Image: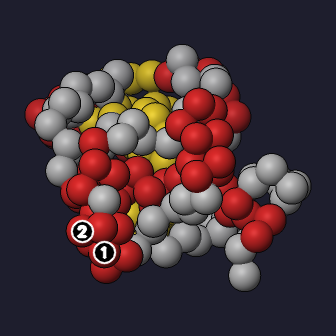
Amino acid sequence: MTTPSAPGSHSLAPGVLAALGWQGCQVVTARALSRPRLVLCELDEHEHARRQEAGLPPTADALLLHCRTHVDPSFLERPSPVRIRGAVAARASWRSARANLAEFGAFGARVAVLPARVACRDAVRAEAIYHGFGLVMAEKPHEVIQPPDTFVSTERTWVHRLVEEIVYDAMLAQRPLNAGTWAATRS
């Protein structure tokens, strides 16, 4: 379910995180809700340690999550091992960025990083405001043209948990391998 970063894939300039005030976040590439996305997140060290001690690897598959919650219904109520800040799409066109981010609204902020000539168009800005997207100029300095809507519902469903588990799996898979991560034991 995870997609490692590949050369030529859409990347994120380091200054974008600083412009958004998200410097402490890790950027992972995860296939969540059918599309690869750049997701900004932070590991909940306490919950991650608890999961490792209990021998609970990420449950990044819908069927496996269903089985796990059937055996242990409280699993859905446990804290998430990751805090998702949002998703970012660095694209050349508004249509492409919007398509990549559209389904992610229930899970975190959505930010389109676009060339200034696209991001500053009145129609793009109006649509971004209407849908709650943030807009950041791709050129340096990475200016925030429109901050993202950061409201995320406190109601969590199994789909929220599935996305959290997919991002958790991606985060661990993209960390450097060492004895203390699940990535070291993955086949």
Q: The C terminus lies in which quarter of the figure?
A: bottom right
The one nearer the camera, 176 or 98, is 176
Q: Is residue 91 above or below residue 120?
A: below
Compared to 120, does 94 lie above or below? below
As displayed, is residue 168 above or below residue 60? above
Q: Position of residue 78 (x, y in %)?
A: 36, 41
Q: Residue at x 33, y 35 (%)?
A: 109
Percent x, y of residue 114:
46, 44
Which residue position is annotated with label 1?
67
Using the rendered image of the protein, determine whether residue 96 is visible from the camera's viewpoint.
no
> Residue 123 in the image: x percent, y percent?
18, 39
Q: Is residue 169 left or right of residue 77?
A: right
Q: Position of residue 30 (x, y in %)?
A: 51, 62
Label 1 neighbour load within 10 Å: few <14, some 14-19, many 20+: few
Q: How many marks?
A: 2
Vertical side of 65 occupied by 161: above or below: above
Q: Residue at x 24, y 56 (%)?
A: 73
Q: Is residue 187 visible?
A: yes
Viewer-proximal residue among 44 and 163: 44
Q: Residue at x 35, y 68 (%)?
A: 68
Name which residue type carries label 1: Cys
* Three-letter amino acid code of the residue under disc 2: His
Mark 1 lies on a secondary structure that is helix
Please indicate whether residue 97 sits to the left or right of residue 177 in the image: left
144 relative to 128 in the view: left or right:
right
Q: Residues within 10 Å of mark 2 (few under 14, many from 20)?
A: few
The residue identified by callout 2 is 70
Does the CB distance between marks 1 and 2 fall below 8 Å? yes
